[in-house]
Image (cartoon, rainbow, N blue to C red):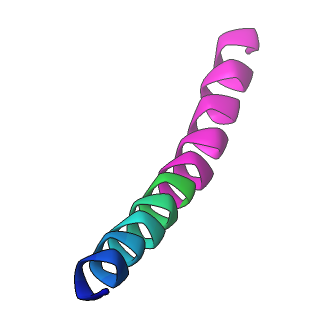
Amino acid sequence: MHTMNASYFIEKVGHGILNAFLLAAMPTALVATIVQFL
């Protein structure tokens, strides 16, 4: 039971980090695209 809770917590943290990374990367890619057009 404890190991299942730990793996679930790690999974939730991993998804949070992935979402944060995507949210950080999307505006950066958008700015890079705009700069290329300019």
- Comparing 34 with 7, the one in front is 7
The C terminus lies in quadrant: top right
- Comparing 33 with 15, the one in front is 15
Indicate whether 25 appears above or below 8.
above
Residue 27 point in image, percent of width and height: 65, 44
In the image, the segment drawn in magenta is 20-38
Q: Residue at x 70, y 32 (%)?
A: 30
Residue 6 point in image, percent of width and height: 28, 79
5 lies left or right of 36 = left
Residue 7 point in image, percent of width and height: 32, 70
Residue furthest to the top: 37
Indicate whether 36 appears above or below 3.
above
Location of residue 14 by image quarter: bottom left
Indicate whether 19 appears above or below 38.
below
34 lies left or right of 27 = right
Question: Does the magenta stretch mainly form a helix, a strand or a loop?
Answer: helix
Numbered circles on residues, count: 0
Q: Is residue 35 magenta?
A: yes
Q: Residue at x 38, y 78 (%)?
A: 9
Indicate whether 17 appears above or below 13.
above
Q: Residue at x 75, y 11 (%)?
A: 37
13 lies left or right of 31 = left
The N terminus lies in quadrant: bottom left
36 lies left or right of 13 = right
- Comparing 11 with 15, the one in front is 11
Q: Residue at x 73, y 24 (%)?
A: 34
Residue furthest to the left: 3
Q: Is residue 37 magenta?
A: yes
Residue 28 point in image, percent of width and height: 57, 39
